[in-house]
Amino acid sequence: MRTILYAVLFICCFIHLTGCKKYTDVNSNPNDPVSVQEALILSPVELNIASVINSGASTGTLTSGFAAVLANHYMQNIALNQPVPNEGTYRLFNPDINDSWKNIYVACLNNLKAMNDKGTTNGNYNYSGIAKILTAYCLGVATDYWGDIPYSEALNGSSKLQPAYDSQESIYKAMQQLLDDGIADINKNAVKTPGTDDFFYGGDMDQWKRFAYTLKARYYMHLTKAPGYTALAQANLALTALQNGMVDNNDNVKMTYTGGAGEQNPWYVNFLPVSTLVLSSTCVDTLVTRNDPRLPKLVAKAKQTGLYTGRPIGSINISGSLDVYSLPGSAYGATGSPVYVFNYAEALFLKAEATLIKSGYAAAQPIYQDAIRADMNKLGIATSDADNYLTARGTLTAANALQRIMEEKKIANFLSIENFNDWRRTGFPVLTKVPNALSEIPRRLLYPEVEVLSNPQAGQSAKLTDRVWWDK
């Protein structure tokens, strides 16, 4: 029987999310999101975005978050203590990515469509505004992984079982329109406002608008090298959007976890011994070499040696114990660590990059320094330690400006899927093909087998090394 993704609607809170039990105890019909209140849709979608899309959590027996893990393999943040070839050496098959695709479309986009429609019908425009903003975010994740994807003919129930693919350029235009429309909905000042059902912002609609404007800036900067676009024009658009964007670390989009049983940070779960997943030597050595004061926050010392040690990616030597390698540190990998969907520091790095394009490295330098300080402040790094680090790493030149901005942005976005986008569009940080690699470093994901079989479209034969439209 052919699997149809776009006709299926269900509320993802009724699927057990690893590390997410606390948030899934609601009582409604899982087969009909249109029949439930907007609040019962918002919570599980936010949880899914943070835990599955951004942090690689699994939903039940499904590998729904595998795409986030792959992005970190390709950015050489993590390594497997397994024989090669493995995901770290770019082994991937179309079926491997089935659940990640279905998660974005079924658990997120379909439910956001229901939330938007219900909010609009009921005059609950804060909910419809949030739905539009998060729809833009999820579309951004999908199109950056796969390029052309279904949208304009998708999400309409059974009316279109084989929706045509939209070009990535048209998806990007739709994302910007969704963000504008989401802001407009919030500006209608509807009476009903989210509360505890809004895990990200607790119903603070001003913060939602600032997030939307910052997302606009991110997506403008993604197109600085896209065919038919210019870096200067995109930088100007980004700088304009950022005038209304995030203002401090209180605007960080994050999901918190108690750390108790069933309520654990998904990255903590991902690095449990059964996965054989550890941090890579590329990741750990970079922080050690730079004497980065964030090191103990980002990286835990190996249990057996008490040293900061990452595993070489692609190594044929299998260690008998994972305890000789480092895992993520307390800021990102403890049982109760938060997951950051979007950081204020990224807003500043976007501003620094856009300013570099428009006005040069001297104008970008103080913004770049502010971005590093914002991340240090988020992590509780002492001011004196931040000052010392900026003495070594805070100066930009014409030759190093873009590289340093992107290198530091990657650290501030530790384990973020956004790093994969930044590397593809700028070439920084500089990465080299790992030993025993099956190909060059991937620049996209394969289309999932379930989609290839159920909705054949041109372009689905794309290889991992093929480039999406904005990466040409």
Image (cartoon, rainbow, N blue to C red):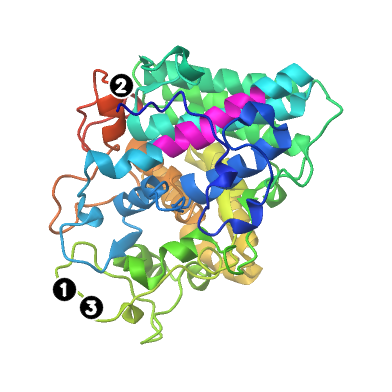
- Which of the two discs, 1 and 2, labels the residue nearer the N terminus? 1
User: Going 52% across and 67% down the picture, which residue do you hit?
Assistant: 294
Residue kind at label 1, given as amino acid type: Asn
Q: Quadrant of the N terminus?
A: top left
How many residues crowd mark 1 within 10 Å: few (<14), some (14–19), many (20+)? Answer: few
Please, is residue 8 above or below residue 299 in the view? Answer: above
Residue kind at label 3, given as amino acid type: Ser
* Side of 127 relative to 48 (left or right): right
Of badges 2 and 3, the one in the foreground is: 2
SS class, disc 1: loop
Q: Which mark is residue 317?
A: 1
Please, is residue 97 above or below residue 300 in the view? Answer: above
Disc 2 to disc 3, how far (Cα)? 43 Å
Q: Which mark is residue 304?
A: none
Q: Report the span colored magenta.
A: 102-116
Identify the image quadrant of residue 284. bottom left
Circle 3 residue: 319
- Magenta span dominant secondary structure: helix
Q: Are marks 2 and 3 in contact (CB under 8 Å)?
A: no
Does residue 108 show up magenta in the picture?
Answer: yes
Residue kind at label 2, given as amino acid type: Asn
Query: In x, y percent, where is residue 143?
Result: 40, 29
Please, is residue 78 above or below residue 418 in the view? Answer: below
* Side of 107 relative to 114 (left or right): left
Q: Quadrant of the C terminus?
A: top left
Circle 2 residue: 455
User: Going 25% across and 69% down the picture, which residue do you hit?
Assistant: 81
- Which of the two discs, 2 and 3, labels the residue nearer the N terminus? 3
One can see residue 446 in this view: yes
User: Going 30% across and 32% down the picture, which residue do you hit?
Assistant: 450
